[in-house]
Structures are given as C-alpha cells and as structure tokens.
C-alpha cells in the first residue's frame, strides 16, 4: 500500500521539456465481428500501456501525456472510442463488455499482452471490464479520475451532460465544465472543443446496458492504480481504506494536487509520472 501526493509541475526526470515522442507513431485499423472498424494509434517501444479516454472524448486528450510515457520507455496503444475518427459507431445494444472486447482485440493484434490498461473517467470502466473479461491480456489497471462504482450524483451528472452538449452556447458550457471538470484557477476553455455528443450518449447506453458488477473490484485480481485529484467534483478522493473496500486489496492510491476530473490538460506531467511509476512497479 502506498499513498503519494503529486504536486503541480511534477515531471518525469529529464522529460519536462519534451513535447514529442521519440519513437515513430502509426495509425492502424482492425475490423471487428460486428463489421465495424477500430482505429488506434501505436507509439513508442517497450512494455505496453493502453490509454482509454473519457466520456464523449477522443485520444487527443492524451496528446500531452503520451510523449512523456513513451520517452520513459513504453509502447502506447491508443484506440479511438467507437464513433470517433476511424472507429465505427457502436451498434445498438452494445455494453461495456463489447467496448472492452474492442480494446482486447487491439492488444492481441499488437501482441501487447500483458498490458497495463489506463482509463480516464468513463474509460476506467472499460479498462476494468477489459481486465475482468480478458485477464491473460492485462497485468495492471490504472483508474484516472475515476468513479469507483457506477453511480454519479444527479446534479453533477447534469453538468457532465451539458459540458458535452455542443448545441449549447459556449458561455453555458463553460460554467458546467468549470463546475464538473476543472480545479479552481484552471482554464476550462481547453475542453470546449473535443466533444462528441452522440458518442457520449452511446457510451452512457453501454454503461446502462451492463447490468452485472462483477468487474468493479479490479483490485481483487490485479494491481490497480487509483489516480485521484484533489479537486474532483465528480469523484472526490477516497481514503485508502475506502478505496480498498470498494476496489480490492491491491488498489493503490495516488492523489494529484490542483486538478479536477479533467486531469489530463490540468496536470499532464504528474499524470504521466504516476502511470510510469505504477507500471515500473509491476
């Protein structure tokens, strides 16, 4: 068990001034059994880490984090969610298990097993289901700014929905982004773009279609990083005891200061450091 607090501006040694990954990157596509495609980015070389973005958002959210991870000696697999870029929309009736099967297919195609699967916000649910349904492919899970269960406060949920609703005026969306996603003093305008409203709606339907909860306790089976933020309005940081009771005995708590639920644009260096340190510890 460990708990560490990562301060704003914390950076991986020798990486603070890096803005680009040192290894080649390539977009690839695989065909899935439903006839759809999954597009994914491959970057770097070394042990494999999979990055999964938040509700209604794409892989561009990790663009500030990914170069820091690849520079530390890891290969990244970055599948675009269904309905974004070259990834086909999710068919009706898809559940989290189907989204996890897409992730598993990418890992298998790239001979990436056993991988660490890191999911931000909504992506953490897909990460945990991937680990549960495909255990031979996963050696660790990283939950980034994650709700431990599946329930979200109804009032905050309205701000999540409004943030992703690109039909609303920017001024209104900014208020919701600031309330739900960003720490005080951090600029929510960076997240005005990048939303895919139909994707967010499909992802919510997938979550609602997943009735079982046997995948939630990832820490019963695997080392699990729970990367919390000090000012998260959606998923406030738990105590270590609360985390282990909800996720399992192998869960590890790290808290990043001066960040909210958005996390990635707020503290990219601290986020990369936490993922790298966790993966190196396995």
Image: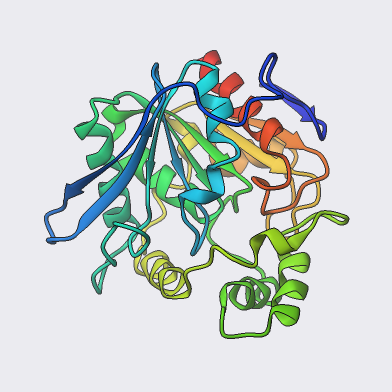
Q: Position of residue 103 (x, y in %)?
A: 31, 44
Name the residue rendered at 56%, 78% in the picture: 166
Q: Nearer the viewer, residue 186 or 216?
A: 186
Specify the quadrant of the image occupied by residue 268. top right
Q: How many marks?
A: 0
Q: Is residue 250 visible?
A: no
- The location of residue 4, given as percent across then percent down, is 76, 26
Residue at 47% x, 51% y is: 123
- What scheme was used to colour the molecule? rainbow
In this rendered view, identify the residue nearer to me: 260 or 148.
260
Q: Is residue 205 above or below residue 136?
A: below
Where's residue 11, x and y in %? 73, 24
Q: Is residue 167 left or right of residue 14?
A: left
Measured along the vertical axis of the image, is residue 39 above or below residue 36?
A: above
Q: Nearer the viewer, residue 85 or 138?
A: 85
Q: Give the camera-side residue of 231 and 26.
A: 26
* Left or right relative to 50: residue 94: left
User: Looking at the rendering, in which quadrant would you find the N terminus?
Assistant: top right
Q: Position of 86 compared to 231: left or right? A: left
- In the rendered image, the vertical position of residue 183 relative to residue 217, given as above or below: below
Residue at x 54%, y 42% (from the top left corner): 63
- Note whether residue 163 is visible: yes
Residue at 26% across / 39% down in the picture? 106
Q: Position of residue 44 (x, y in %)?
A: 41, 24
Q: Is residue 193 above or below residue 16?
A: below
């Amino acid at each position: 068990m460990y708990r560490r607090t990562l301060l704003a501006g914390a950076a991986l040694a020798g990486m603070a001034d890096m803005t680009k990954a040192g290894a080649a990157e390539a977009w690839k596509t695989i065909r899935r059994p439903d006839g759809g495609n999954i597009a994914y980015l491959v970057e770097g070389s070394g042990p494999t880490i999979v990055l999964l973005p938040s509700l209604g958002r794409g892989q561009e959210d990790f663009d500030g984090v990914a170069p820091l991870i690849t520079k530390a000696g890891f290969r990244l697999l970055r599948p675009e969610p269904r309905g974004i870029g070259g990834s086909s929309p999710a068919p009706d009736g898809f559940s989290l298990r189907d989204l996890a099967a897409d992730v598993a297919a990418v890992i298998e195609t790239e001979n990436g097993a056993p991988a660490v699967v890191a999911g931000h916000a909504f992506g953490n649910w897909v990460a945990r289901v991937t680990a549960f349904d495909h255990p031979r492919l996963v050696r660790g899970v990283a939950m980034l700014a994650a709700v431990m269960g599946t329930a979200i406060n109804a009032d905050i949920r309205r701000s999540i929905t409004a943030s992703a609703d690109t039909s609303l005026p920017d001024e209104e969306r900014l208020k919701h982004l600031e309330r739900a996603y960003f720490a005080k003093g951090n600029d929510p305008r960076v997240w005005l773009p990048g939303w895919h409203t139909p994707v967010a709606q499909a992802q919510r339907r997938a979550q609602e279609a997943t009735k079982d909860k046997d995948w939630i306790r990832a820490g019963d089976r695997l080392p699990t990083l729970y990367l919390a933020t000090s000012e998260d309005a959606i998923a406030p940081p738990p105590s270590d005891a609360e985390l282990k009771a909800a996720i399992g005995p192998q869960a590890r708590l790290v808290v990043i200061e001066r960040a909210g639920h958005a996390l990635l644009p707020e503290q990219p260096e601290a986020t990369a450091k936490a993922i790298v340190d966790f993966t190196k510890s396995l």
